[in-house]
Amino acid sequence: MRRKLRIGLVSPYGWDSPGGVQVHIRDLAKFLISNGHEVSVLTPVDDEESIEEGFVVSAGKPVAIPYNGAVARVLFGPVAASRVRQWISASDFDVLHIHEPAIPSLGLLACSIAEGPVVGTFHVAAQKFKIAFAIVPIIEPIVERLRARIAVSEVARETLKNHIETDAVVIPNGISWDSFQGARPRMEWQLGKTIGFIGRFSEKRKGLSLLIEALPKIIEIHPDLKVLVAGPGEPDEILQELDPKLKSRLTFLGLLSEDEKRQFFKSIDLYVAPNTGGESFGIILAEAMATGVAILASDLSAFRSVLEDGKWGELFYASDADDLATKASALLADPARLESLAAMSSEGAKRFDWSVVAEKIMDVYDLVSSNGEKVILASGNRAWNKLIRGRGE
Amino acid sequence: MEWIFAFLVALIFIWYLTFTASRLDRLHHRVETSWASLDALLQRRAAIALDISHIPSLDPATAVVLTRSAYLAREAEMAERSEAEESLTNAIALLGESEDFHTEYPEISEKLEVVTEKIRIGIGIHREAVATTKHQRSRPIVRIFRLAGTAPLPVVHPFEKVPL
């Protein structure tokens, strides 16, 4: 039996803007609450009216800054810092769980302010940046305060090791495995032989252009091929540059709801993840697996570990359009193989279910909070305080 | 004019010294707390091992190793302790190899698995805390000004390097 804890979660990005980290925090919060823990989430919020969850506390409106090749909606500054301080001192947490403590947002603020049983999760996988020599000395003594570090994947762990020379426990992101079971295909998306793609397709690293490059070769062998593209973005940008002969092959579905996403996976013959880099985990692959669909993914290390080196889906050489075309054609020509891949992949996603993942996270909570210490505001200068207190006693 | 400048530099330097000292103090605290939770888990594992050693159908050799290392793990000094934890780890690994143990005693083997998983995480956290602290303590400024005070140099115990 676990101790019931008061847990504070800190999100670095705007709660009402889409993103994997926010989804992860929301699902984790819900799971913890259903296990009897008390949870409060501090996060930047754009529109406070839109927040439905009672456990969410707004720290103010996020600002958009470019970070790590995308625009991040983060929050910092003296007002935010005082909100963080208020929230921590008023809440009496047993554990504070900070997401992205090294990114200039609420996470970094909370990490520099709090003391005691504090856990940090690192989501990002990034190349070593050029100005690291200037930033690391600021971040290192702050991140050092964390009692335990979690990385969501081996790639994220490596990033952490390279950037700030600190190690972490790997605990993957979670999915609600049950909710992906029993999805049904949608008639209008079953168009003969179909390949599916999901993602912000205007971002180069998501690899839609690679898939398009591979299309002519696949069409030679499978003349009736269609491609369904789901995800937010402006299709015109892609269509303008597209070979007119390929235009009829592509259908853009826009952003899908959670339900539609499951129907999508069930309707297509082959899910292709042609990402060219920058992926830390690949939650979408875990979701595809849980639904049960044949998968062909680029061999990025994040994807390799989700698919356990090809056990739950096939891999092609990342950024190699020829290899993608060959592997996709071969798979599409072999319906029996597609079917068996689709039938078994769901089993491989069980290890990402929240019941498994949150158990491990709660193990970490237990470890850091076992002595009953509470999360408090850090005293600016421990050595002085100790000296003064020591004298006073 | 110059003496003001010198005074400011000295002030900043003193601030930096106290900043580094408090950083070290915090790190030492982290090493202590991570060891304390790991220690508690190891004690729990020793208790479970002792329970297992009472299973009548267990072969006597395993029973002896389990009992001995469980007692040592609970009572010995650190030098012997590490050895005891290591032999406990190895004895438990041998147990894990037998399918019968899992099927015949699902409850205790489940308990053991849960605590082992936690120990794995606990060791990771402790080793990380020790490594960071050692790294900071090796800095010249810390050594010259003896900022670590009388705190003993933290160590990773040999048993922590044995895979569970």
Image (tube, coloured by chain):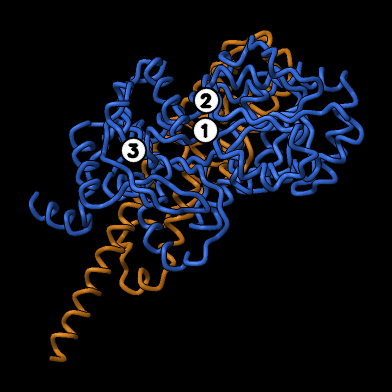
Chain colours: A blue, B orange
**On screen, residue B25 above or below B3:** above
Q: CB of mark 2 within 8 Å of CB of mark 3?
A: no
Could you tell me which residue is drawn at 14 percent across and 53 percent down? A390
Q: Nearer the viewer, mark 2 or mark 3?
A: 3
Label 1 and label 2: CA atoms lie apart by 6 Å
| Image: A184 above or below A123 | above
Could you tell me the amino acid type at mark 3? Pro
Q: Residue at x 35, y 37 (%)?
A: A10
Using the image, tell me which numbered label, if any, was put on residue A71: none
Residue identifier under label 1: B119
**Residue highlighted by disc 3:** A117
Is A381 left or right of A251, judged from the image as shown? left
Q: State the residue in front, A95 or A322.
A: A322
Query: Count of labels shown?
Result: 3
In the picture, measured across the screen, residue A6 lies left or right of residue A311, that is left
Mark 1 and mark 3, same subunit?
no
Residue B146 image point, x, y percent: 32, 68
**Residue type highlighted by circle 2:** Val
**Residue B110, horizontal then vertical, whole percent:** 58, 16
SS at mark 3 in the image: loop
**Residue that protrudes farthest toward the left in the picture:** A392
Mark 1 touches mark 2? (CB < 8 Å): yes
Spatial CA span between label 1 and label 3: 18 Å
